Amino acid sequence: MMDKRILAQLEKITGRDGVLTSPEDLAVYSYDGTFEQGCPEVVVLPRSTDQVSQVVRLAAQAHIPVVSRGMGSGLAGGSVPSLGGIVLAMTRMNRMLEIDQANATAHVEAGIVTADLQTAVEKLGLFYPPDPSSIRESTIGGNIACNAGGPRCLKYGVTGNYVLGLTVVLADGRVLQVGNKCIKDVVGYDLLALFTGSEGTLGVITEALLRLISKPKFACTALVEFATLNEAARTVNAILSAGIVPAAL
């Protein structure tokens, strides 16, 4: 059970509505898309990078484990609090901070649902290609943490190919900003690649700067049936060998 003094400090940081302790609430945050389970001692729902920083700093000082969580749709058990402690749920940090049409970028908070981001940019003639199977219930922060793919990664690549910048809260509460809008950002260590796919082990992603492309003007879908799996596989190879790369196949 979490120390009452720690709970009071958490409420001071996020407000009373940002701290959940009832058994019913804790149960909701005890599992993800796997069969793994682990009940947290408290769930905290921050609304800003500064609040995340304060919570992580407090946890570090008190030696309390922290597990960050988006929508809990992951299939790797990464958001399950197996050691109890604090679940840091990022779903209230779901704002679209900027869509820069001239530079074809989107600056978003980590808790925004991927499908909502795609809908917003497509209204402006832009396109965010990554399409994980959980696109309607997964967050950008979770996608980046797992370097999510999806059927369209055959043509367009995975999430990491569209990450230009990140705001990350490190384990001691310090805030790190890496990357920018420049496509040729090749100076120093590639910290974007380090954090992308790290599944929360190196820090808590709070904001992301994402690369967009022009929305395709046309789409065509075809259905072909095969008698055997081998015939289908050979056809896939033949299509790709011919230099044709469909959006999904």
Image (spheres, rainbow, N blue to C red):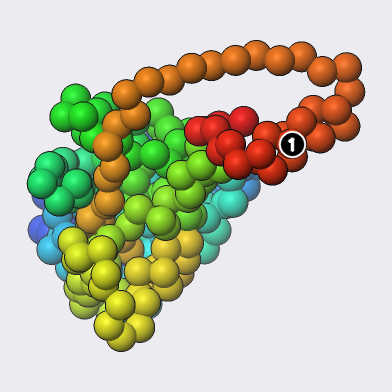
Q: Is residue 211 left or right of residue 229?
A: left
In front: 101, or 40?
101
Q: Quadrant of the C terminus?
A: top right
Q: Residues within 10 Å of mark 1 (few under 14, many from 20)?
A: few
Q: Is residue 227 left or right of residue 77?
A: right
Which quarter of the figure has residue 203?
A: bottom left
Relative to 68, residue 232 above or below? above
Inspect this view and state whether residue 173 appears. yes
Q: Is residue 34 left or right of residue 107?
A: right
Q: Position of residue 16 (x, y in %)?
A: 15, 46
Callout 1: SS: helix
Q: Position of residue 215 (x, y in %)?
A: 29, 31
Q: Position of residue 53 (x, y in %)?
A: 20, 68
Q: What residue is at 12 percent from the left and 42 percent from the top?
A: 101
In front: 14, or 231?
231
Which quarter of the figure has residue 49?
A: bottom left
**Residue reaching furthest front?**
242
Inspect this view and state whether residue 4 appears. no
**Residue reaching furthest bottom?**
188
Relative to 126, residue 228 above or below? above
Q: What residue is at 35 percent from the left and 75 percent from the top?
A: 191
Residue ID for mark 1:
238
Q: What residue is at 35 percent from the left and 53 percent from the top?
A: 162
Q: What residue is at 33 percent from the left and 57 percent from the top?
A: 163
Q: Is residue 100 left or right of residue 79?
A: left
Q: Position of residue 26 (x, y in %)?
A: 41, 43
In front: 191, or 219?
219
User: Of the residues shown, which amino acid type is indicated by label 1?
Assistant: Ala
